[in-house]
Image: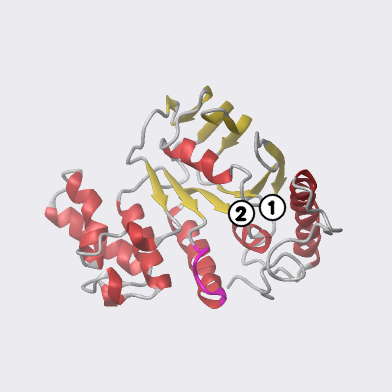
């Protein structure tokens, strides 16, 4: 999972479900060790594109490659962290959940134990290793899910709005922790979010998508701001405004198409500025 891991390439990808065109002509290269955020409103195809990279969805046109090999099915080299922590096995302890993948791959007992201890420590769950998922908070369950993915040592980690169901404070803590873990592991991460602030806090690049149907990659924004990041910093604030206008234009276009446009100003989220009502300052 270091920077020498293999990149992902998306080439002219079209995705359909019957007659419905979900994504059209998507092109994106993701470098090894890069943190890329897919940002856009609901229904823009960002999760669908992520699922194509994971191998859950097969494009009808174009191709997705990882390490130069065409993606045709799910593979242990691409780990997925889902929004719902229900992906954990409820009948297994945290330790057993994290150990599951390496055990299925035939990793020896001693090596498994070392890996499990490493990743439980990394996500701050060593003290809860023998608890069951139902005994954990939402944030702790997501930590456990992340540890389970990392224990398989994938070359790419795919995250589909993993903090979307968490409360604001827990979400902020998880963003801080993910930034730390990413820097510690050097993993390649593709992260789906509809939260502009979250994308700025985490991403090396932010990829916006047009509204669906027939969604496409719209713009790619480099985000080379120093870490830890502060959303009140002038450069961060300027990028926030630019992204808000970009995403807001797609939301407005969708509303117009539905005949629901009532003077929408392009602002998104639950708060007045697209930040879901949170004034998040520093990622520390």
Residue at disc 1, secondary structure: loop
Residue at disc 2, secondary structure: loop
- Looking at the picture, does residue 59 appear above or below residue 127? above
Q: Residue 278: x, y in percent?
A: 66, 74
**For residue 165, side relative to residue 36 (left or right):** left
**Residue drawn at (53%, 70%) of the image:** 171
The residue tagged 2 is 203
In contact (CB < 8 Å): disc 1 and disc 2: yes
Q: Is residue 267 magenta?
A: no
- Local packing at callout 2 (Cα closer than 10 Å; few below 14, some 14-19, many 20+) is many
Magenta residues span 163-168
Measured in 3D between alpha carbons, the distance from the residue under mark 1 to the one under mark 2, in whole angstroms, is 6 Å
Observer-nearest residue: 145 or 58?
58
- Looking at the picture, does residue 61 appear above or below residue 152? above
Is residue 172 among what the camera can see? yes
Q: Residue 215: x, y in percent?
A: 65, 37
The numbered dot on residue 144 is: none
Q: Residue 258: x, y in percent?
A: 74, 47
Is residue 11 among what the camera can see? no
Q: Residue 114: x, y in percent?
A: 22, 60
**For residue 237, side relative to residue 139 (left or right):** right
Observer-nearest residue: 65 or 135?
135
**For residue 135, side relative to residue 65 (left or right):** left
- Local packing at callout 1 (Cα closer than 10 Å; few below 14, some 14-19, many 20+) is some
**Residue drawn at (65%, 48%) of the image:** 205
């Amino acid at each position: 999972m270091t920077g020498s891991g293999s990149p992902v390439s998306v080439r002219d990808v079209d995705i359909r479900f019957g007659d419905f065109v979900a994504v059209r002509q998507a092109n994106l290269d993701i470098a090894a060790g890069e943190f890329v955020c897919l940002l856009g409103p609901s229904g823009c195809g960002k999760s669908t594109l992520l699922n194509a990279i994971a191998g859950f969805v097969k494009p009808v046109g174009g191709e997705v490659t990882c390490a130069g090999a065409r993606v045709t099915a799910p593979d242990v080299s691409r780990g997925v962290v889902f929004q719902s922590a229900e992906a954990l096995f409820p009948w297994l302890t945290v330790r057993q959940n994290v150990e599951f993948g390496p055990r299925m791959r035939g990793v020896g007992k001693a090596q498994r134990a070392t890996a499990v201890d490493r990743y439980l420590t990394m996500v701050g769950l060593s003290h809860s290793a023998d608890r069951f998922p139902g005994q954990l908070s939402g944030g702790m369950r997501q930590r456990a899910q992340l540890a389970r993915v990392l224990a398989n040592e994938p070359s790419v980690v795919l995250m589909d709005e993993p903090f979307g169901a968490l409360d604001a404070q827990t979400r902020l803590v998880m963003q801080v922790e993910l930034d730390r873990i990413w820097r510690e592991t050097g993993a390649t991460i593709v992260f789906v979010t509809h939260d502009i602030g979250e994308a700025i806090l985490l991403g090396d690049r932010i990829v916006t998508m047009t509204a669906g149907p027939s969604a496409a990659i719209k713009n790619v924004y480099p985000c080379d701001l120093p870490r830890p990041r502060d959303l009140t910093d002038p450069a961060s604030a300027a990028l926030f405004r630019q992204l808000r206008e970009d995403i807001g234009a797609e939301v407005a276009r969708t509303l117009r198409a539905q005949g629901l446009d009532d003077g929408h100003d392009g602002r998104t989220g639950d708060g007045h500025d697209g930040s879901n009502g949170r004034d998040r300052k520093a990622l520390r």
